[in-house]
Amino acid sequence: MIDTLLLPFQFPFMRNAFLIAAMVAVPTGLLSCFLVLKGWALMGDAVSHAVLPGIVLAWMTGLPLILGAFAAGMGCALLTGYLSDNSRVKRDTVMGVVFSGMFGIGLILHTWAPTNEHLDHVLFGNMLGVGANDLWTAGTISLGVAAVLLLRWKDLLLHAFDPAQAQASGLPVRALHYGLLALMSLTIVATLSATGLILAVALLIAPGAIAFLLVRSFGAMLWAATGTCVAAMLTGVYLSFFLDSAPAPTVVLVLTALFIVALLRRLRGARAAVGRRP
């Protein structure tokens, strides 16, 4: 019985999958709290899709894929901000147009590129095929992003709740705004090998949404989101071994199940509070 339960840890590719899952869970869990509070769920989706043309162009020119992905992600964020500030179109509409357009450009560029490589590992991740370079890249980015978020979380929190008050307090509002976008782009790059572009948005939103339903303070929300993301990532990878399923979609299903449980718990608590009122 014990041997069966420990069977996934006997394979090197599974140990690497557990390791990269734990690495990317920390920054995505922390970042999801800020994205949920700022209402940037669609922004995370937009940037995760928009990095595709940067990846293809970097591959075609021989540059590191991480540079192309980061440049495309920041380009999408900057273009979205410029268009929403200089037009009558709402930000969410602009984001939908920009990220779908950039995603389409990436697909077209891939068909033009002289390669037989498939997009599956970029779109959906390849957690079972990560190597030493993937682990170093994900680990370095995750450590840097987590450190910045933990060091500046109070400033970012004030900026998320009240940008006007943050500016009146002397905080560099524009630096915080674009810094958060840069951290989001870097985090998406770190998750490429784990979940790919399409499923990365689940890691950027679900942990923060779950924690928002469970706790009442932002400090506790950071801990709850990170713990939830780590637990969901490791559980999803573990279950995928026995279910013979892809790890990334399994992780997303675990996060979805946890969100439903948290929502039901919150609704039950609200009904109980209403029932106790005189």
Image (cartoon, rainbow, N blue to C red):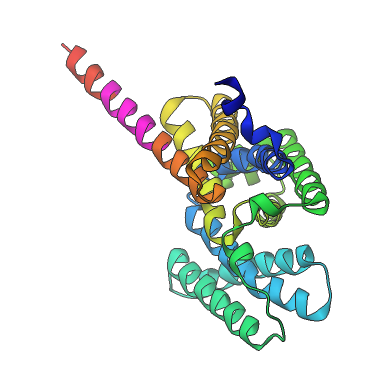
265 inside magenta stretch = yes
For this rendering, which residue is in front, 69 or 181?
69
For the question of whether residue 184 can be seen, the reply is no
Q: Position of residue 168 (x, y in %)?
A: 64, 43
Q: Residue at x 65, y 75 (%)?
A: 53
For this rendering, which residue is in front, 157 or 264?
264
Q: Position of residue 131 (x, y in %)?
A: 78, 52
For this rendering, which residue is in front, 29 or 7?
7
Quarter occupied by the N terminus: top right
Q: Residue at x 54, y 79 (%)?
A: 104
Q: Position of residue 17 (x, y in %)?
A: 67, 43
Q: Residue at x 47, y 40 (%)?
A: 255
Q: Residue at x 83, y 72 (%)?
A: 63
In the rendered structure, the answer to whether residue 53 lies left or right of residue 229 reads: right
For the question of whether residue 9 can be seen, the reply is yes
Q: Position of residue 80 (x, y in %)?
A: 56, 69
All told, the count of numbered labels is: 0
Principal secondary structure, stretch drawn in magenta: helix
- The magenta region covers 259-269
- Please tell me whether residue 93 is drawn above or below residue 129 in the rendered image: below
- Please tell me whether residue 31 is drawn above or below residue 64 in the rendered image: above
Quarter occupied by the C terminus: top left
4 inside magenta stretch = no
Residue 88 sits in which quadrant? Answer: bottom left
